[in-house]
Amino acid sequence: MLELDGLSVTYRLAGGDVHAVRDVSLSVAVGEAVGLAGESGSGKSTIALSLLRLLPRTAQLEGRILLGGEDVVAMKWGRLRAVRWSSASIVFQGAQHGLNPVRRIGEQIAEPLLVHRLASAAEARSRVAELLEQVGLPAWRARSYPHELSGGQRQRVMIAMALACSPQLIIADEPTTALDLMVQAQVLTLIRQLIASHGISLLMISHDLSVLADVCDRLAVMYAGRLVETGPSDSAFQHPYSKALSAAFPTVGDPASRLAPRGLAGDPPDPSDLPGGCAFHPRCPVALDSCSTTPVELHPAGPDRHAACVLVEETC
């Protein structure tokens, strides 16, 4: 359904080039859910926006983004407008900022249907009621404004909008970050049910590996704009960064993990001034001398798993 082939994104800024995404290759099969994880600034949201060419003019794309076999990078604007929402849609991070505050939510859900001429005005109203019920909201909520809804309800509206034109792929960028744990669990359950019942492919982006593992079939971990590990969501991580990212979340009911969190020291590198070799080596607790000079590509690290680490390479 989706294939990234050597995708690189560079922001051309007055102070110099910023290499936000570097040579990323990743695929999402039909009906598959893939999770993309990493710290803030790792390039996750840049990838999400690049899939439908929503990046600012300062961004330069290299490589290919194949959506159903078509290269999004090479599409003309007319074809790109036809693909957005109908073939692939996006659930943005923070529904409060993704919805127009002065328009009723029913109008906003119906808009892609009307723009793509997939329904008449009467058919669109009927479809809106159906979509709201699918995401667990009563049909009369179509007359509400965004400020009249809770955070979880607004997120459900965003999911309804993404489903409006029956796309084959949904890109969900941190869809539960702003929600409390109870509402987060409800939204995740809803996403799982919808992708299973509609056969939709999903690329879900989050910094929370537990959320991604709960929904996705495969996980991909990014660091400093590159993929450092990919593999099934139900098998153990091998890359030191993936392990540290997973261990950074405290265990519920375990006072030791709450009082002494196992986070990762330091900050991610500046994408405009990346270190040589493996970009993770300044923070890696098991780095070798060669890690500062020799970049490591993804290579087999177990069944259906790939990791970019010289220690994993030696072990395997």
Image: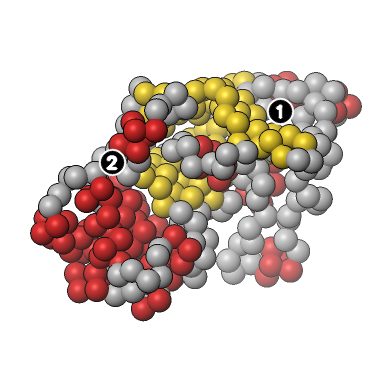
Count how many numbered circles sit on residues in the image.
2
Give residue 309's mark. Answer: 1
Mark 1 element type: loop
- Choose mark 2 or mark 1, whichever is in front: 2
Contact (Cβ within 8 Å) of mark 2 with mark 1? no
Picture quadrant where residue 300 is located: top right
Picture quadrant where residue 187 is located: bottom left
* Residue 107 x, y percent position in the rendering: 26, 63
Q: Residues within 10 Å of mark 2 (few under 14, many from 20)?
A: many
Q: Residues within 10 Å of mark 1 (few under 14, many from 20)?
A: many
Picture quadrant where residue 141 is located: bottom left
| Residue drawn at the location 75% of the way across and 46% of the way down | 268
> Of residues 284 and 115, which is closer to you in this image?
115
| Residue drawn at the location 58% of the way across and 51% of the way down | 207
| Sooner in the amino-acid sequence: mark 2 or mark 1 | 2
Q: Quadrant of the C terminus?
A: top right
Q: Is residue 64 visible?
A: yes
* Residue 43 x, y percent position in the rendering: 62, 41
| Residue drawn at the location 49% of the way across and 23% of the way down | 64
Residue 214 located left or right of residue 313: left
| Residue drawn at the location 28% of the way across and 58% of the way down | 109
Kindly identify the amino acid type of the residue bearing the numbered disc 2.
Answer: Ser
Residue 246 located left or right of residue 175: right
Mark 2 element type: loop
Residue to which mark 2 is pinned: 86
- The CA span between labels 2 and 1 is 39 Å
Residue 127 located left or right of residue 69: left
> Of residues 294 and 8, which is closer to you in this image?
8
Kindly identify the amino acid type of the residue bearing the numbered disc 1.
Answer: Cys
Residue 12 located left or right of residue 175: right
